[in-house]
Amino acid sequence: MLARIGFYGTKEINGMKTNEEESLGLLVVGFALGLVAGILWAPHSGRETRRELRRVSRDKLSYLIDEAERLRDGTDHLADSSRKWLARLTTPSHPAKTAAELGSKEFNH
């Protein structure tokens, strides 16, 4: 497909001249036809569709809230484990233990 862009937004594609205004007009016509087709072939009435959208959005929001709480609990557990590990690493009661020994002990639980 050969395209050559000229002045003032006109284009020549395979010998046919088009311009941006025609393209925008065709986009608007396509949108309108899609809107009409969607209304004519809609599986439910507008009221039922809105009700279903509200139900689905509530369900998805509830799922997202549950997942966020689960993620927060997991990060809290990770932070607590890290604090405990660092506290044991820095306590003078285990001067002979290395970080690797403490780490392997922590992961073997």
Image (tube, rainbow, N blue to C red):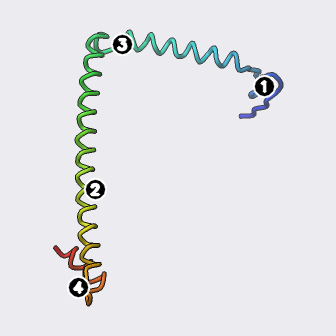
Label 2 vs 4, first from the N-terminus? 2
The amino acid sitting under disc 4 is: His
Q: Nearer the viewer, residue 91 or 6?
A: 91
Q: Which residue is mark 4?
A: 94
Q: Report the Cα–Cα distance between label 4 and label 3.
A: 74 Å
The amino acid sitting under disc 3 is: Trp
Which part of the image, by quadrant, shows the C terminus? bottom left
Q: Secondary structure at mark 3?
A: loop
Left or right of 104? Residue 14 is right
Q: Which residue is mark 1?
A: 15
Q: Report the Cα–Cα distance between label 3 and label 1.
A: 39 Å
Furthest residue toward right: 7
Q: Nearer the viewer, mark 2 or mark 3?
A: 2
Q: Report the Cα–Cα distance between label 2 and label 4.
A: 27 Å
Residue neighbourhood size for the residue with mark 3, other residues' Cα within 10 Å, grouped as few (<14), some (14–19), many (≥20):
few
Label 4 vs 3, first from the N-terminus? 3
**Vertical comparison of 105 with 25: above or below:** below
Q: Secondary structure at mark 1?
A: loop
Label 1 vs 2, first from the N-terminus? 1
Q: Which residue is mark 3?
A: 41
Q: Which residue is mark 2?
A: 75
